[in-house]
Image (cartoon, rainbow, N blue to C red):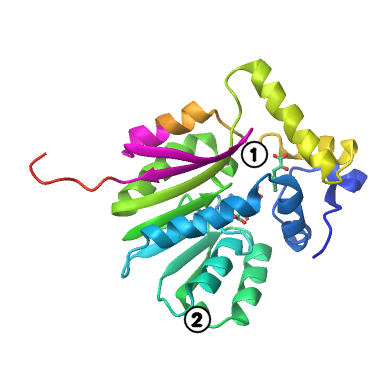
Amino acid sequence: MEVDTIFTSEESASSPFAFNASVAAVFDDMLNRSVPLYREALTLQMKLANRFYLPGTRMYDLGCSHGNFGVGFLEAAGDRDFSMVAVDNSKPMLEIYEKRLSVRRGSGRIQLCCEDISTTPMEEASVVVMNLTLQFLPLAMRDEIIGRVYQALVPGGILLLTEKVVHKNAFLADIQQESYYGFKAANGYSSLEISRKREALENVLVPETLEAHQERLGKSGFSMVEIYLKWFHFTSFLAVKEKKQCGV
Ligand SMILES: Nc1ncnc2c1ncn2[C@@H]1O[C@H](C[S@+](CC[C@H]([NH3+])C(=O)[O-])CC(=O)[O-])[C@@H](O)[C@H]1O
Ligand SMILES: O=C(O)C(=O)Cc1ccccc1
C-alpha cells in the first residue's frame, strides 16, 4: 500500500483538496490513517447491506471511490447474486476500482458509473450507501439528493449514511477537533500535514451538525433512524424507509 505523503509538500497547501490521481494512489492509507473506525464502519455496512438487500432490486454506492465497499461485498457474497451501481465522479478512483474488479469472479454484478451524484438516476433500490460522500456535495443540493434516495428506495429499503459531523456546541466542537487531530498525529501525520489538509478541505468538505442530518432524513420521509457507529465527528446513520401497513 502506498503511503500518503500528499500534504508533506509545500505546494499541496495552495490548492483545494481534489480526488485526483495522486490522492487515488494513496487513498487506502489516507482512509486508514484519517478516518477513525473506517474498517469497522465498512464491515457493518456490508452486514447491513446483506441483511436488507432484496433480490431483484439494486444497491447503490454513491461516492464509491476505488471500491472498498463493492469489492468487500462481492467477496463476501460468494455465489449469491446481486446488482450494484457504484457511482463516483473521480476518473482516477474508478480506474483503480475497475482494475480491482477485473481480477475477481462475478464482477459483472457491479456496474461502475463515472458521474455526478446530483444527476445520477436511481430506482428500485433496497440499499443505498453514502459513506463520507454527502459532505462533499454543495449544501444547497443535499436536501434534494436525500429526497431522491428516499423516493428510489423500495419500502423496507435502507440508506447507510456516514458523515463527518460537527457538534452544535462550540466547546464540544473543539473537543471533537482536538481528539481527531490527536488521532491523526498518533497515525504519523505531522502538525504541518494536518494543518495543510485542513486548509485544503475548507469549503470542500463541509460538515453539518448531527441534528441537521436527522432533520433532513426526517423531512425526506425516513421515520426510523439509528446511529450505529460514532467516533466524535464520524457518525454512521441507518435510515429505514418504512413499509406502509394496510389500513393504517
Ligand atoms: N458530486 C459528486 N459526485 C460523485 N462522486 C463524488 C462527488 N463529490 C465527491 N465524490 C466522491 O466521493 C468520494 C468521497 S470518499 C468516499 C469513500 C468511499 N465511500 C469508501 O467507503 O471508501 C470520502 C473521503 O474521501 O472522505 C470520492 O471518491 C469523491 O470522488
Ligand atoms: O476531515 C479530515 O480532516 C480528513 O482528513 C477526512 C478525509 C479523509 C479522506 C479524504 C478526505 C478527507
Q: With respect to residue 144, does 103 lie above or below?
A: below
The image quadrant that residue 39 belongs to is bottom right
Q: With respect to residue 176, does 227 lie above or below?
A: below
Q: Is residue 243 left or right of residue 177?
A: left
Number of disc labels:
2
Q: Amino acid at mark 2?
A: Gly
Task: Please state the extent of the stretch shown in magenta in the rendering.
Answer: 216-241
Q: Is mark 1 within 8 Å of ligand 2?
A: yes
Q: With respect to residue 98, does 129 lie above or below?
A: above
The image quadrant that residue 60 belongs to is bottom left
Regarding ligand 2, which quadrant of the image does it lie in?
top right
Q: Are marks 2 and 1 in contact (CB under 8 Å)?
A: no
Which residue is found at the position 76% from the left and 28% from the top? 178
The numbered mark, 2 or 1, whose residue comes first in the sequence reads 2
* Structural crowding at the residue carrying mark 1, measured as other residues with C-alpha within 10 Å and reported as few (<14), some (14–19) or many (≥20): some
Please identify the quadrant where the C terminus is shown.
top left
Q: Is residue 132 left or right of residue 242?
A: right
Callout 1: SS: loop
Q: Is residue 219 magenta?
A: yes
Q: In front here: 107 or 18?
A: 107
Q: Amino acid at mark 1?
A: Leu
Callout 2: SS: loop
Mark linked to residue 106: 2
- Between tags 2 and 1, which lies in front? 2
Res 235 seen here: no
Residue 155 in the image: x percent, y percent? Answer: 26, 52
Q: Is residue 91 magenta?
A: no
Mark linked to residue 205: 1
Residue 104 in the image: x percent, y percent? Answer: 59, 81
Which residue is found at the position 52% from the left and 35% from the top? 139
